[in-house]
Amino acid sequence: MRREKTSVSQEDYLKAIWELVQEEQTPISARLAEDLGVTPPAVTAALKRMARTGFLHVRRDGRIVLSVKGQGIAQHLVLRHRLAEKLLTDVIGIDWSRAHEEAERLEHGISPQVAALLLKRFGRDVRCPHGVPLFGGMSKLRRKFGAVRLSDAEVARSYEVLRVFEKDPKFLEFMESLKLRPGTRLRVHKREYDETMAISVGHHSARIHLGKPATERLWVRRVPS
């Protein structure tokens, strides 16, 4: 089937909208402007153009809804992005804190043939370096593994890190310094009044304190203590 021809800019918009939905945020113009680093008037103009070409529509309440065509393009780009991250970290050896940023540059240039070869190399059931499945995204993490944000985790319970927010390299470096990566086990000891959480990582007894800006950027699943 012939793929719809799109510009790099349109692909970026479609992917950003798709990712907002995956992260359970309402896709509206203001959030898109923030995510893409563009002005609100630029977003408004772009959305009007993309609505005319049938990629999306904007509801009266401001919510942006992707069409079937728009969803398909977004999903293809997200897959290429995750494959690029795997290539960068697993083959080339780039640190996971830089993989997302570098993959943003590569994703638009990956052809269907190269994507197919990368899928054959890595397999369909793996996750990107930050923990998101190649297929299914956050929906699969929630459905199959019961993923929740660490900020919503229960006290006196043990968890495994499933996903770490990947769009902030400094945050990833911070997580790396604490050994908090997908697959790491942790235990929640206390939630303070200001929602700071005291946790321990792995088998270490030392406690780490994480504020809500950090605990909202980690997705975990409950595991036996």
Image: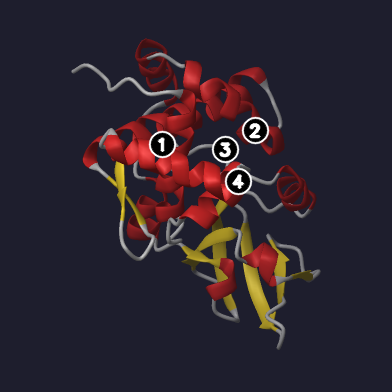
Cα distance between the residues tagged 1 and 4: 31 Å
25 relative position to 101: left or right: left
Q: Amino acid at mark 3?
A: Pro
Question: Mark 1 or 2 closer to N-term?
Answer: 2
Q: Position of residue 42 (x, y in %)?
A: 53, 41
Select label 1 or label 4 by which is in front: 4
Question: Mark 1 or 4 closer to N-term?
Answer: 4
Classify 10 Å Cα crowding around label 1: few (below 14), some (14-19), many (20 and above): many
Select label 1 or label 2 by which is in front: 2
Select label 4 or label 2 by which is in front: 4
The residue wearing badge 3 is 129
SS at badge 4: loop
151 relative position to 80: left or right: right
In this view, 71 is above or below 216: above
SS at badge 2: helix
Q: Amino acid at mark 1?
A: Leu
Image quadrant in which you'd find residue 118: top left
Question: Mark 1 or 3 closer to N-term?
Answer: 3
The residue wearing badge 4 is 39
SS at badge 1: loop
Q: Position of residue 167 (x, y in %)?
A: 63, 44
The residue wearing badge 2 is 101
Q: Position of residue 12 (x, y in %)?
A: 48, 34
Cα distance between the residues tagged 1 and 3: 10 Å
Select label 3 or label 4 by which is in front: 4
Q: Amino acid at mark 2?
A: Glu
Image quadrant in which you'd find residue 86: top right
Please name whichever residue, 157 or 29, is drawn nearer the observer in this view of the structure.
Answer: 29
Cα distance between the residues tagged 2 and 3: 13 Å
